[in-house]
Image (cartoon, rainbow, N blue to C red):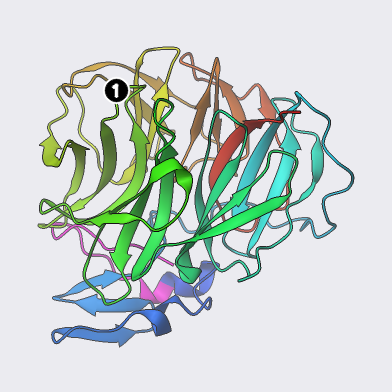
């Protein structure tokens, strides 16, 4: 599936839709068209723009190589204090778990009670728990670091696609690409990562993609399309929404927003770069202090949501040095059909 396009670059998607996985997941049938909308083969058309619930850049015809789908379950309890890498696959609706950073396959996480339907963005907290945005179910599923399902949080009326946890307060922030009624998306906040959310709509944004806290400041930053359907970065803190102007970079297609402790800045990705995935180092005021460019190869050219952990960045099926970038340190042998999100967890006792 494919997200809305900028008003300056409306693409013809229908011809390429057969090449893309996930378009039959039923998302279009869940979207209720507005008065000026019509349901098309690729999603909702609203005022000339096509909306779906995927965060993938449709300019890339394929994401991952579907060579060996992993279907066997998680085997055994993951040992304590082991770092694990979680990858979501919206093409076949599963979640795969590997050792980190070496990439040894462990197994697949059990599906939540409501089932998986287009799992996308992921995040983890200090306890090692992993949260998965289960987009077409309007839920966020929490797993313990050992792969045990814990709870499903409801995100009523929204299609969640990304998340981040405040390391100071434990608040879970979720980005919603659009609402289930074909209106603007926004953010949902879950105090202590539990209960019902407080839901907000940013008046400056129509679609919201990836989201992260700026360190321990409690301030949120997120990517998406503004009300003119141009790529934008916005922020939220203490009830105030503000568009963030990047000084030193231009985003072509919204992607990753992740906190990088190594550089004490945000890693903001651009899915619109064709020479290689690019992640800008962005300070709180929008100043760009550098960039990380990854070598482009099959399986990780298009990176919807990367994860920065210590001296590494996980992008698609590659693990790279951060902030150096360049060629991958490891390639994870995987059968991902349409990989989108990732998270790194440390299993606690």
Which quadrant would the N terminus be assigned to in this image? bottom left
Circle 1 sits in a helix, a strand or a loop, which is it? Answer: loop
Q: Where does residue 345 sit, x and y in percent of width and height?
A: 64, 32
Q: What residue lies at 36% left-to-right and 22% top-to-bottom?
A: 215
Res. 73 in view: yes
Residue bearing the label numbered 1: 217
Range covered by the magenta-colored residues: 1-15
> Is 309 situated left or right of 47 in this image?
right
**Residue 249 position (above or below residue 242):** above
Q: What residue lies at 38% left-to-right and 65% top-to-bottom?
A: 159
Outermost residue, right side: 76
Q: What residue lies at 65% left-to-right and 63% top-to-bottom?
A: 112
Q: Where does residue 333 sit, x and y in percent of width and height?
A: 75, 41
> Is 257 situated left or right of 35 in this image?
right
Quarter of the rendering containing residue 206: bottom left
Which quadrant would the C terminus be assigned to in this image? top right
Q: Main secondary structure of the magenta part?
A: loop
Q: Is residue 109 magenta?
A: no
Q: Where does residue 8 sit, x and y in percent of width and height?
A: 13, 57
**Residue 127 position (above or below residue 74):** above
Query: 53 and 174: which one is in front?
Result: 174
Q: Where does residue 331 sit, x and y in percent of width and height?
A: 69, 33
**Residue 270 position (above or below residue 39):** above
> Is 63 situated left or right of 48 in this image?
right
Q: Is residue 6 magenta?
A: yes
């Amino acid at each position: 599936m494919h997200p809305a396009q900028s008003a300056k670059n409306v693409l013809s998607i229908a011809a390429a839709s057969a090449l893309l996985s996930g378009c039959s997941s039923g998302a279009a049938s869940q979207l209720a068209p507005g008065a000026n909308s019509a349901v098309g083969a690729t999603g909702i058309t609203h005022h000339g723009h096509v909306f779906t619930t995927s965060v993938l850049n449709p300019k890339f015809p394929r994401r991952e190589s579907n060579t060996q789908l992993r279907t066997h379950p998680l085997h055994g309890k993951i040992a304590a204090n082991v770092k694990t890498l979680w990858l979501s696959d919206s093409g076949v609706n599963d979640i795969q778990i590997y050792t980190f950073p070496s990439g040894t396959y462990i197994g697949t996480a059990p599906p939540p009670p409501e089932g998986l339907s287009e799992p996308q963005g992921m995040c983890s907290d200090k306890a090692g728990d992993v949260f998965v945005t289960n987009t077409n179910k309007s839920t966020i599923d929490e797993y313990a670091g050992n792969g045990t399902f814990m709870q499903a949080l409801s995100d009523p009326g929204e299609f969640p696609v990304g998340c981040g946890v405040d390391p100071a307060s434990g608040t879970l922030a979720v980005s919603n690409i659009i609402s289930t009624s074909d209106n603007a998306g926004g953010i949902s906040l879950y105090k202590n990562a539990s209960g019902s959310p407080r839901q907000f709509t940013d008046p400056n944004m129509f679609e919201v993609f990836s989201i992260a806290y700026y360190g321990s400041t409690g301030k949120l930053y997120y990517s998406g399309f503004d009300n003119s359907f141009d790529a934008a970065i916005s922020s939220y803190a203490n009830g105030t929404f503000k568009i963030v102007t990047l000084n030193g970079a231009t985003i072509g297609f919204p992607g990753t927003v992740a906190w990088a402790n190594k550089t004490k800045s945000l890693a903001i990705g651009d899915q619109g770069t064709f020479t290689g995935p690019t992640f800008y180092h962005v300070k709180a005021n929008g100043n760009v202090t550098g960039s990380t460019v990854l070598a482009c190869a099959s399986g990780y050219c298009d990176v919807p949501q990367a994860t920065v952990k210590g001296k590494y960045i996980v992008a698609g099926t590659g693990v790279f040095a951060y902030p150096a970038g360049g060629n991958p340190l490891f390639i994870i042998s995987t059968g991902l059909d349409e990989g989108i999100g990732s998270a790194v967890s440390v299993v606690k006792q």
